[in-house]
C-alpha cells in the first residue's frame, strides 16, 4: 500500500515537473481571473499552515512563517514562474506600484478587518482596571517615547513637515505593538496572570489603541503637501474624523450590550457571529467613507462586544472565519515584498534601525514608569521588552499606507523589515527575561485575591460527568460558556459582571472566581453534585440485560485490522500463573510495564481493577477483555495472556476464562478503544481461531495465530 502511494506521488511529481517549461509555449485558456483567484486562495490557505507550523517549531509566532511564505510564493519569486495554463504565473506581478491583483488584496483587506475584530473581542477591558494606573502610566510612557522616534525619523531622514501624512503613519507604526505575539509568549511561559503579564497586556491594548488613533489622524490629514495649507485644512478634517470615531465608538459601546441581549433571543450563537461580522464590514466601510481607517471601525465594534456576555462566545465562533482569512492577510503582506531589494542596505538598514530606535524608546518609555509604579528593575525590564514586538497592527497600517500611495514599495518593505526584526529579536529576549530569577514587583500589590473551590472525585469518569452537568446547569442559568484554547480543559462562565473559571484535570475540578462570587460558585457545585448523585443512584437501579451484553460481545461486526495493528509479540504471554482475575490483570500490567510503554503502572492497575469491579468483562467460551482508559499511558496498548488454569471472570456463559486481552487507552486522547474491543470479540468468536489459540505453547505461536487471522 505504501509503495503504491510512493509510486503515485513520484509519477505526479514527474508529470508536474516539466509543466513550467511547457507552459511557456502552451496555454489552454484557463487564465480567467476568477479561476486564478481560486487557485491562489487554495494555495495560500494550504501552505500558510505549513509556514506557520515551521515558525512555531523555532519558537517564533506563526505570522513570521506566513510572511516568509508569501515572499517565496509571491510575484517577485515563484509566483511569476509560468505553469500549465498560466503563462505569466499563478501570482503574476500586477504592476510596479502595487504588485498583486486588487481581487487578492481585497481578501487580505477582509482578513485585516476580521483580525482586528477578533483582537477587539479578545481585549479584556477589565485587564486595564486590574493594572489600574500602572498600565496607563506605562502605556503613556512607552507610547510617547515611541511617538517621538516615529515623528523624528521621517522628519530627519525624509525632510518631511511635522504634519505630513507620512509622519503620522510612521508615528502609528512606531507606537503599535502585537497583542497576539505578546499573549503567545506570556502563555508559553505561564506568565499571563502575573503582574508583569497583566501590565504588558493592558499596556499593549492601550498602545494599539493609540496607534489606531494616529492612523485616524493620518487618514484625516490626507495628501496635503503645501505647508501653508496644512493648518487650515487639517483641523476640520481631524475634527470630522474624531467626531465619526467618537460617535461610532459611543454608539457601539452602549449599543452592543443591548444588541447582545436581543441577538441571543432571536438566534443561535452561530447566527449571531454572522450578524456581527456583517455589521463589522458595514461599519468599517462607513468609517472609511468618512476618512477613518476601516480597521478602526472593526476594532471599536469588537471592543464594544467584548464587554458583553456574548464576548467569549463570539471569540469562539469567530475562530473558523479568522483561521480562513487571517493567514491570507499575512501571506499577501509577504507577497508585497520584493526579495531582490529586501536585503539591500537601503532597505535592510533603515528597517533594522527604525526597529532598534523605536524598540529602545518603548523599553525606556515603559520601563522608567514601571520602576516608579511598584516594579523592580527586573519587572520593569520585562514590561519594557514586552511592549517591543510589532505584528498584525503594524502590518495592517503599512499595507493601508501602501494601498493609499502614502508609502512607496521601498518604504513598505522597510516597515516589513522592522516588523520581522522586532518580533524575531524581542520574542526570545522576552522569553529570557521572563525566566530570570527574582521577583518583579515591590510589595504584594501584584497578587490577586481569588476564591478557589477544589473538589476531588474518586475517578475520572465521575469528574467528567460532573463537568458536563456543571456546564449544562450554568448554561440553563443564563451563563455563557466558553472553552479557552489552553493546555487542558479550562472553561469560562460569564454573565454580566460575573466571571467564573472552571479547571478540569484528571479527577480534580477547580473553580476560581472573585471572592464576592464564592457563594454562587459553591452553590453551583453543590447543586451539580446532588443532581449527579441522584442520576447515578437511578442508573444503579437499572439492570443491564444479559442479552444486550451478549449481543455486544458476539454480534456480527465490521472486520478490520485493529487487532493486527495493536498486537505486539512483546506483550503476548503464555503459561501465566494466576488464580484470580485480579492476579491475571496484575501479571499483564507488569508485563506491559517491563516493555517501558507505561507512564504509571500503578495508576493503570488501579483504573483497570476499578473498571472490572463495576461490570465484569468475561465474554464467552473462555475469553475475557479487561480494559480501561487511564492517565497511566500515552498510547493505546494491548496485552494478551493465556493462563495455565481457568480463571473466573464472571463470563456471560458462566464458564471460566483462559485467554485474556487487556486494553488500556490514554484518558485524554481519542483512540479506537471500543473498536478494538469489537474487533477482538469478532475475531475470537470463530472456532478456527479461538481453539488453536487456547492450545498455543509459546508466545510466538499465540502471536502468529492471532495476527495471521486478522485481515491485512
Image (cartoon, rainbow, N blue to C red):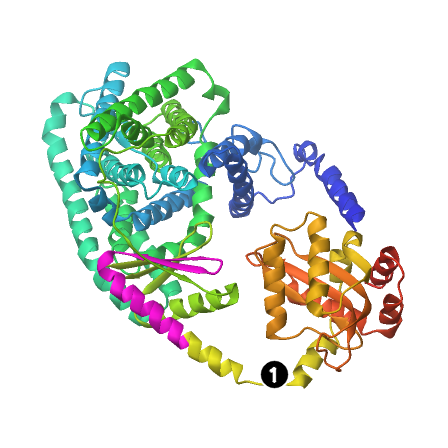
**Residue 521 in magenta?**
yes
Q: Is residue 356 left or right of residue 326?
A: left
Q: In this picture, is 577 found above or below 194? A: below
User: Residue 153, located in which quarter of the rendered image?
Assistant: top left
Question: In which quadrant of the rendered view does residue 9 lie?
Answer: top right
Q: Residue 77: horizontal and vertical position, in percent?
A: 55, 28
In front of the other: 506 or 642 = 642
Tell me: residue 6, above or below residue 226: below
In this picture, residue 294 sits left or right of residue 572? left
> Which quarter of the rendered picture does the C terminus lie within?
bottom right
Residue 387 rendering spot, x and y as whole percentages? 31, 32
> Can you identify the residue that label 1 sits on?
544
Q: Is residue 60 left or right of residue 569?
A: left
Using a 10 Å C-alpha cutoff, classify the residue at mark 1 as few (fewer than 14 neighbours), some (14 to 19) or many (20 or more): few
Q: Position of residue 326 (x, y in %)?
A: 43, 44
The percent coordinates of residue 181 (x first, y second) are 39, 37
Secondary structure found at label 1: loop
Q: Is residue 116 above or below residue 83?
A: below
Q: Is residue 377 above or below residue 676?
A: above
Q: Residue at x 80, y 77 (%)?
A: 621
- Among the 4 quarters of the image, the one containing residue 177: top left
Q: Is residue 659 magenta?
A: no
- Report the residue at 43% width, 76% height from top: 533
Give the residues in magenta.
502-531
Looking at the image, can residue 711 be seen? Answer: no
Q: How many marks?
A: 1
Residue 485 appears in the picture as rendered: yes
Q: Nearer the viewer, residue 252 or 610?
A: 610
**Residue displayed at 16% across by 41% down:** 242
User: Observer-nearest residue: 159 or 99?
Assistant: 159
Amino acid at each position: 500500500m505504501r509503495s503504491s502511494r510512493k509510486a503515485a506521488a513520484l509519477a505526479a511529481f514527474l508529470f508536474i515537473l516539466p509543466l513550467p517549461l511547457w507552459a511557456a509555449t502552451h496555454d489552454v485558456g484557463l487564465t480567467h481571473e476568477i479561476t486564478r483567484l481560486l487557485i491562489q486562495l487554495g494555495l495560500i490557505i494550504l501552505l500558510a499552515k505549513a509556514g506557520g507550523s515551521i515558525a512555531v517549531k523555532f519558537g517564533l509566532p506563526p505570522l513570521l512563517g506566513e510572511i516568509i511564505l508569501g515572499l517565496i510564493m509571491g510575484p517577485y519569486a515563484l509566483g511569476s514562474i509560468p505553469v500549465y495554463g498560466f503563462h505569466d504565473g499563478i501570482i503574476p506581478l500586477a504592476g510596479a506600484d502595487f504588485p498583486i491583483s486588487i481581487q487578492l488584496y481585497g481578501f487580505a483587506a477582509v482578513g485585516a478587518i476580521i483580525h482586528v475584530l477578533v483582537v477587539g473581542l479578545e481585549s479584556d477591558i477589565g485587564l486595564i482596571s486590574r493594572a489600574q494606573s500602572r498600565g496607563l502610566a506605562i502605556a503613556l510612557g512607552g507610547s510617547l517615547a515611541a511617538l517621538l522616534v516615529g515623528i523624528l525619523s521621517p522628519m530627519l531622514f525624509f525632510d518631511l513637515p511635522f504634519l505630513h501624512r507620512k509622519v503620522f503613519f510612521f508615528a502609528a507604526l512606531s507606537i503599535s505593538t502585537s497583542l497576539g505575539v505578546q499573549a503567545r509568549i506570556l502563555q508559553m511561559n505561564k506568565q499571563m496572570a502575573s503582574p508583569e503579564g497583566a501590565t504588558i497586556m493592558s499596556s499593549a491594548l492601550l498602545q494599539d489603541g493609540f496607534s489606531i488613533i494616529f492612523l485616524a489622524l493620518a487618514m484625516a490629514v490626507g495628501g496635503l503637501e503645501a505647508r501653508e495649507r496644512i493648518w487650515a485644512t487639517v483641523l476640520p478634517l481631524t475634527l470630522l474624523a474624531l467626531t465619526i470615531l467618537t460617535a461610532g465608538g459611543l454608539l457601539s459601546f452602549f449599543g452592543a450590550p443591548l444588541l447582545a441581549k436581543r441577538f441571543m433571543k432571536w438566534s443561535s450563537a452561530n447566527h449571531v457571529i454572522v450578524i456581527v461580522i456583517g455589521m463589522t464590514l458595514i461599519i468599517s466601510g462607513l468609517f472609511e467613507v468618512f476618512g477613518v481607517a476601516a480597521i478602526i471601525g472593526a476594532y471599536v465594534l469588537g471592543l464594544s462586544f467584548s464587554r458583553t456576555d456574548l464576548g467569549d462566545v463570539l471569540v469562539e465562533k469567530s475562530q473558523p472565519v479568522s483561521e480562513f482569512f487571517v493567514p491570507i492577510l499575512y501571506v499577501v503582506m509577504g507577497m508585497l515584498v520584493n526579495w531582490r531589494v529586501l536585503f539591500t542596505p537601503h532597505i535592510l538598514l533603515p528597517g533594522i534601525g527604525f526597529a532598534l530606535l523605536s524598540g529602545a524608546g518603548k523599553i525606556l518609555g515603559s520601563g522608567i514608569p514601571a520602576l516608579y509604579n511598584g516594579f523592580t528593575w527586573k519587572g520593569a525590564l520585562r514590561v519594557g521588552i514586552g511592549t517591543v514586538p510589532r505584528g498584525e497592527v503594524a502590518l495592517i497600517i503599512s499595507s493601508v499606507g501602501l494601498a493609499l500611495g502614502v508609502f512607496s514599495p521601498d518604504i513598505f518593505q522597510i516597515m516589513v523589515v522592522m516588523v520581522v526584526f522586532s518580533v524575531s529579536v524581542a520574542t526570545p529576549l522576552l522569553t529570557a527575561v521572563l525566566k530570570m530569577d527574582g521577583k518583579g514587583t515591590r510589595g504584594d500589590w501584584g497578587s490577586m485575591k481569588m476564591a478557589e473551590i477544589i473538589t476531588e472525585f474518586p475517578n475520572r469518569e465521575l469528574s467528567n460527568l460532573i463537568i458536563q452537568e456543571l456546564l449544562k446547569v450554568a448554561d440553563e442559568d443564563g451563563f455563557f460558556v466558553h472553552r479557552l484554547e489552553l493546555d487542558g480543559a479550562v472553561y469560562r462562565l460569564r454573565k454580566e459582571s460575573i466571571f467564573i473559571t472552571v479547571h478540569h484535570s484528571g479527577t480534580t475540578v477547580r473553580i476560581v472566581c472573585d471572592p464576592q462570587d464564592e457563594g454562587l460558585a459553591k452553590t453551583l457545585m453543590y447543586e451539580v453534585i446532588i443532581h449527579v448523585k441522584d442520576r447515578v443512584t437511578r442508573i444503579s437501579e437499572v439492570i443491564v440485560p444479559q442479552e444486550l451484553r451478549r449481543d455486544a460481545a458476539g454480534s456480527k461486526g465490521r472486520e478490520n485490522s485493529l487487532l493486527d495493528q495493536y498486537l505486539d509479540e512483546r506483550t503476548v504471554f503464555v503459561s501465566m500463573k494466576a488464580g484470580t482475575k485480579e492476579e491475571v490483570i496484575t501479571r499483564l500490567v507488569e508485563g506491559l510495564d517491563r516493555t517501558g510503554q507505561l507512564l504509571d503502572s500503578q495508576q493503570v492497575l488501579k483504573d483497570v481493577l476499578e473498571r472490572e469491579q463495576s461490570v465484569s468483562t468475561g465474554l464467552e467460551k473462555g475469553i475475557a477483555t479487561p480494559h480501561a482508559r487511564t492517565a497511566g499511558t500515552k498510547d493505546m496498548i494491548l496485552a494478551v495472556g493465556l493462563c495455565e488454569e481457568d480463571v473466573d471472570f464472571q463470563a456471560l456463559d458462566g464458564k471460566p476464562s483462559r485467554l485474556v486481552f487487556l486494553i488500556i487507552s490514554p484518558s485524554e486522547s481519542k483512540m479506537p478503544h471500543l473498536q478494538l474491543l469489537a474487533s477482538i470479540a469478532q475475531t475470537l468468536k470463530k472456532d478456527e481461531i479461538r481453539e488453536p489459540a487456547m492450545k498455543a505453547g509459546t508466545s510466538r505461536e499465540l502471536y502468529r495465530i492471532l495476527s495471521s487471522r486478522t485481515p491485512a
